[in-house]
């Protein structure tokens, strides 16, 4: 039975209108997945000795590296759960078509849940815990205790996997939990309250008592059985899989009428972000890129000015890249109807352009706190903002013309379903978006000065703004050429 399901999904993948794009996307993502696995394996193999060296030098206060790891495992699993919520794709099993075929509902749910067990988010922690466990055995720790601890860590990972399935339907639970975790982290950083004093002994317990792995194993099993029962009950066309209807609400967005015919599209986008979970999540994640620059403030990047340029582009253009990169997929559910209306295509593109520009301006204002790290950071932020507004907004719209994977606006409200697209054309467009400003900076910074490099980036953005209409004219023509291929691709629901 599992072989049949796998064969059906393989055929669906091969026959998809976006086969080439999805294939390249999977290869690209697969490369980085392997890279992450290797890095986590290296961290697991060498973290014990690195921590041990810091303890011996007096830079860390702990009895041994194993105790320190156990102390902070609570944050490991907390971050794991947050990343799962935002990035883990729930399995797509094309449930509705399968209900007409002679498959039992139990088999369908078992296959879909089995795919979650084989998720990259479950495999990745294993690549850390496996080499770390081997190191513990080499260092002379009790084999039974180490084995119990290792099994317990894997069981907790699976527990989070099944827990994430429910959290996808429970925003009111998830966000307060994240806020509590963040509050605990801040409290520990400022030495108000240390939660690890209470969680550390719990993880130590799994090593000290060789039988204790049964506890997380039992919890993982109970959660899996509950998830199985819950989704099996939901597997009815007239119940769990039917479209959810909410009370209609009217909103006063008349202030957007000043934009003329564009206001129709702008109102749709505002309502989309307010009402849809996936769009709302993308909106929030776009603004979280404001803190991306903090990664480039460490001593490792000192003297590497490209880090400031790269960070500035993401800090000010997080929404532009995350939301704008999926235009027009956000409108895929009614794209055919929209294209049948007598509305100029230019207005559609301009509405998206203005939305990205406004959000970029807001992100820029919020990113000005980087001036505390040095005036050069403010120069980078302002230059990156002008470049994003002038050039990257138009280039991002151009990339959207080649994204032909529809977005199911209800996918994140279900346990099953999500998709995204990627292709070689959108990859090539990262050159003017990311690489070109760094090249421009170094051409002027190495020959003149750092300030000249930032001015050159901003000047390039201003040129893009001056020639915006001409660039959008070319983008509009490409959208028109791709129009019917896009409609055909959006017609495929799988």
Image (tube, grey):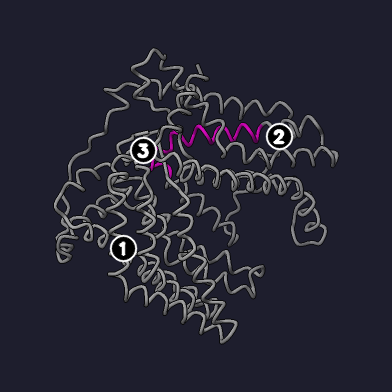
Which of discs 2 and 1 lies nearer the camera? The answer is: 1
Q: Distance between the residues labelled 3 and 2?
A: 36 Å
Within-10-Å neighbours for mark 1: few <14, some 14–19, many 20+: few
Q: Which stretch appears magenta?
A: 152-174
Q: In this view, does 487 lie above or below 186?
A: above
Label 3: which residue?
Answer: 411
Residue 18: percent from the left, percent from the top? 41, 41
Q: How far apart are marks 3 and 1 (CA)?
A: 33 Å
Label 2: which residue?
Answer: 149
Within-10-Å neighbours for mark 3: few <14, some 14–19, many 20+: some
Q: Is the magenta stretch mostly helix, strand or loop?
A: helix
For the residue labelled by badge 2, is the local secondary structure a helix, a strand or a loop? Answer: helix
| Label at residue 59 | none
| Mark closer to the chain start, 2 or 1 | 2
Label 1: which residue?
Answer: 474
Q: In this view, does 293 lie above or below 165?
A: below
């Amino acid at each position: 039975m599992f072989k049949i399901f796998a064969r059906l999904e393989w055929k669906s993948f091969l026959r998809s209108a976006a086969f080439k794009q999805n294939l390249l996307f999977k290869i690209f993502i697969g490369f980085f997945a392997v890279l992450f696995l290797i890095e986590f394996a290296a961290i697991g193999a060498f973290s014990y000795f690195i921590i041990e060296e810091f303890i011996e030098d007096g830079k860390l206060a702990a009895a041994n590296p194993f105790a320190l790891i156990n102390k902070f495992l609570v944050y490991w699993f907390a971050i794991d759960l947050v990343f799962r919520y935002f990035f883990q794709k729930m399995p797509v099993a094309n449930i509705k078509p399968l209900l007409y075929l002679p498959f039992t509902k139990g088999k369908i749910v078992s296959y879909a849940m089995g795919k979650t067990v084989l998720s990259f988010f479950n495999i990745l922690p294993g690549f850390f815990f496996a080499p770390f466990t081997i190191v513990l055995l080499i260092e002379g720790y009790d084999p039974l205790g180490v084995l119990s601890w290792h099994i317990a860590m894997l069981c907790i990972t699976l527990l989070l996997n099944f827990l994430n399935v429910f959290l996808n339907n429970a925003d009111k639970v998830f966000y307060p939990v994240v806020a509590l975790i963040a509050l605990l982290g801040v409290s520990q950083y400022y030495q108000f309250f240390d939660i690890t004093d209470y969680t550390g002994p719990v993880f130590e317990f799994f090593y000290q008592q060789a039988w204790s792995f049964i506890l997380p194993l039992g919890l993982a099993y109970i959660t899996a059985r509950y998830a199985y029962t819950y989704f099996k009950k939901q597997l009815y066309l007239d119940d769990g899989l039917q479209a959810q209807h909410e009370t209609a609400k009217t909103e006063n967005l008349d202030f957007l009428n000043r934009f003329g015919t564009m206001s129709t599209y702008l109102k749709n986008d505002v309502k989309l972000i307010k009402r849809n979970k996936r769009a709302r999540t993308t909106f929030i994640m776009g603004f979280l890129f404001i803190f991306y620059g903090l990664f480039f403030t460490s001593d490792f990047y000192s003297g590497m000015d490209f880090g400031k340029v790269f960070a500035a582009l993401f800090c000010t253009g997080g929404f532009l890249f995350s939301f704008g990169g999926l235009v027009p997929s956000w409108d895929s559910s009614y794209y055919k109807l929209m294209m049948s209306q007598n509305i100029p295509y230019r207005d559609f593109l301009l509405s998206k352009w203005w939305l990205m520009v406004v959000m970029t301006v807001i992100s820029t204002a919020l990113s000005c706190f980087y001036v505390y790290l040095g005036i050069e950071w403010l120069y980078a932020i302002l230059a990156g903002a002008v470049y994003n507004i002038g050039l990257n907004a138009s280039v991002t719209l151009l990339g959207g013309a080649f994204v032909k994977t529809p977005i199911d606006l209800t996918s994140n409200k279900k346990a099953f379903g999500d998709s995204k697209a990627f292709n070689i054309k959108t990859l090539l467009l990262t050159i003017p978006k990311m690489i070109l400003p760094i090249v421009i900076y170094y051409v002027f910074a190495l020959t003149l000065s750092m300030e000249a490099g930032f001015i050159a980036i901003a000047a390039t953005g201003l040129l893009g703004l001056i020639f915006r209409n001409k660039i959008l004219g070319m983008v509009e023509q490409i959208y028109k050429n791709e129009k019917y291929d896009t409609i055909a691709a959006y017609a495929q629901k799988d």
